[in-house]
Every structure is written in structure tokens, then in C-alpha cells.
Amino acid sequence: MVTVQRWSGREARLLRDALRMSLRDFAAYLGVSDRTVSNWESGGAGYQPRVESQAVLDTALGRASDGAKARFAAALGANGAVQPVTGRIGVDSHKFLPVFVGVERTRQLRAHMTLSVDHQWLESSSARVDHPEAQTCVLHVFACGVAVFHLVQPHEPAALTELAVWRYRSYASDLPWARDKLRDLLDEDHCGIPNPEYVLSLYWLASGPWAGSAYDTALRLLSTPSVLVDRGAPGGPAPLDGSVEESFLATGFDHPDIVSFGVRGVSTGYAGWSGVAYAPHSRERSLTIDELVTCELTVQALWCFTRHVQQMIEDGQDPSMPEQYGWRFLRAAHSRLTTARAQETAQHVLMREAIMKTSGLVERLRAAQDALRESVG
């Protein structure tokens, strides 16, 4: 029977993985708080829980099934070492830059665009535009008044930290670029175009050098890149010491706000507060990049729409929208995004639920719906 002489954050994480539990479920199973488990795992091998917590972990291991004990023993025997790098990191970065420009402006933009078929209930049109660094850039314009730039930029970074720093630095130039591009397309003064403001990424992991739990951790880090970056550095976002990433990959990383939507043997997918990370393992059975992008575009457009309603309220105005995009429009959007459809796969439902939860869109839709209903009541 496997035993642990002295529990550290590393062994606690290995036990949770062996039990195949989320951080929240594991904390509830042990009878401790989410933050306690997060602190253990963040501390890794150098952090030892208190005596009473040691006993709790002993009990949890003793209660585990034979299969979970076998998985724990195998992971423990690997000594927590990160697998040697045997391949490259290949990531396709998908950026989404939304801005509310109003129904009249979107009508003007859509006059020379191709009608999209992906958003049958959320009417939109799209056109390719030039971007100085993106492999492709498509402007999606939604009839409800939102424009969303979708930038695709492949990367082969030496480390995840390098990609995280690039993400923050490049957004600093991409956001004003998007505003300038809209100004040119609409032939308006710069001051008349609102600023794109919401930042959410999608990372499609094509290849990586990690194995086992380190691979899973890499996807979690891709969904929450801020933990690898010093965003308050004097010269702008700067990388944290490389040992931070190495420590995470060796001991694991989790956060209560990260939501998994992968399917064992098919894919690994996480939605976090900064975006989504996805790796297909079975191309035939996993989600496609088009499915992920379509979901992101819908969420981005409606997030931006509801943000505009919120902004009107904060500015002391009675919120108002054209009747076809009033509270009934938001009620329908809420129903479509929170109700499973007969033709949807389980993976698609899990993906949408995870993105909706981490983006906070469900609450925003309700709040905006109530505000618009009150303004016409």
C-alpha cells in the first residue's frame, strides 16, 4: 500500500489528479476551502500543510479506490519531474477585439460584406481586412451594433511565458489599431469611434513538449497567462523568472475560476478569466477550431452589447436600443446560449457552458435585459 511520510503541495496535487477531481470537488471532499487547496498546490514540493491537514490527506488516500491509489503511486514514483523537452510548442493565437459602434454604423459596414451563415439567429456579415502582423484578420459585424476583429497569429514560443508576454504587449498596439481601422472604414473622425476594450483570447495548441500532468498544466497556464507576467513592470508587461513556469509545470497549477470542458482521450480544454485553451487529441472526435471561434464570436458580441447597456446606465442615461434589439432580443439570446440543442454534441455543450461561466455573460444578459425592460415599462 502506498503511503506518504510527509505531505507537500506536490503530493496533494498528485492525489487530486489520481482521484480525478476538480479543485473545488477535492476541497469539498477533504472538508477544506478552495483557497486552502490552491495554496497547497501553488507552494508545490516546498510547502507542507499543517499537521491536521496532513491527517486529512492521509484519510483521503486511505479512502481512495484501488484504481486511484494505483494512479497516485505511479505519479508519485515519477518523482514529480517535468518530462524532458522533446518537441516544439506550436500555438495558434486567436484574438477577438470587439467594439460597440451602433446599429447605423454596422448597417453601413455590412453593406459591402458577405453575409455570415454561422450566426443564423445573431445576424452578421464579415470581410477580411489587412493587419500588419496577423496571418489572417476578419472583421465580423453584427446587426445589433457590434463589430469584432478576429486575428489569427501562429506562434512557436520557446516557453509559455514568452507567449504570455507577447499577448499583453501586442494587445497594447492591436486595440488602437482596431479603432483606427474602423475609423478608416467608416470615414469618420477618430474621436467618434469608441475604444475596443474587452480582451479575451483563444489558444489552439497544435503541439507541445510536455507529457502527463505537465501537459494538462500547460493548457491551464494558456487559459490564465497573467500568472506568468509582471503586468505592473515599469516598462510594461515583463516576464516573470523562468523558474515560475518550471515550478508550475512540475507541481501543477489550478484556480477555482478555471473550468474544464475537455473529454478524456478526445481533447483537453480549459476556459479561464483571460480566455480559452484547447488541444485536440482525436481530430475526428474533438471540437473544430470553427466551432470554438463561432462560440467566442457570439459571446464577444453579446458581452460588448451588454457592456454598452451598462455604460449608458453608469453615465446616468436611461438605456435604450432599437426595438428589435431590446429586452426581448436579450431574452432570446439568453435562452439560446443556456439551453442545449438537440443537434449539439456533449462537447459543444460543455464548451459553451464553460465559456459562458468564465465570461460572466449569463449575469450580464440578465442585467441588461432587466434594464431595457424597465426603460420601456
Image: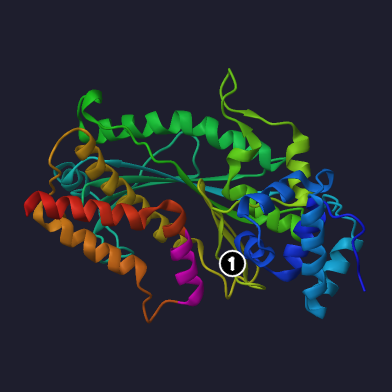
- Asked whether residue 321 is in view, the answer is yes
Q: Residue at x 79, y 49 (%)?
A: 50
Q: Residue at x 89, y 60 (%)?
A: 78
Q: Which residue is drawn at 40% across and 38% down?
A: 130
Quadrant (top left, top right, bottom left, bottom right) of the C terminus: bottom left
Q: Does the magenta stretch include residue 352?
A: yes
Query: Which amino acid type is shown beneath numbered disc 1?
Result: Gly
Residue stretch in magenta: 345-354
Residue furthest bottom in the image: 342
Q: Mark 1 points at which residue?
A: 262
The answer to which of 46 and 296 lies nearer the viewer is: 46
Quadrant (top left, top right, bottom left, bottom right) of the N terminus: bottom right
Please give the count of numbered marks on the rendered protein: 1
- Asked whether residue 211 is in view, the answer is no
The answer to which of 63 and 207 lies nearer the viewer is: 63
- Would you say 300 lies left or right of 247 here? left
Chief secondary structure of the magenta portion: helix
- Say if 259 sits above or below 2 in the image: above
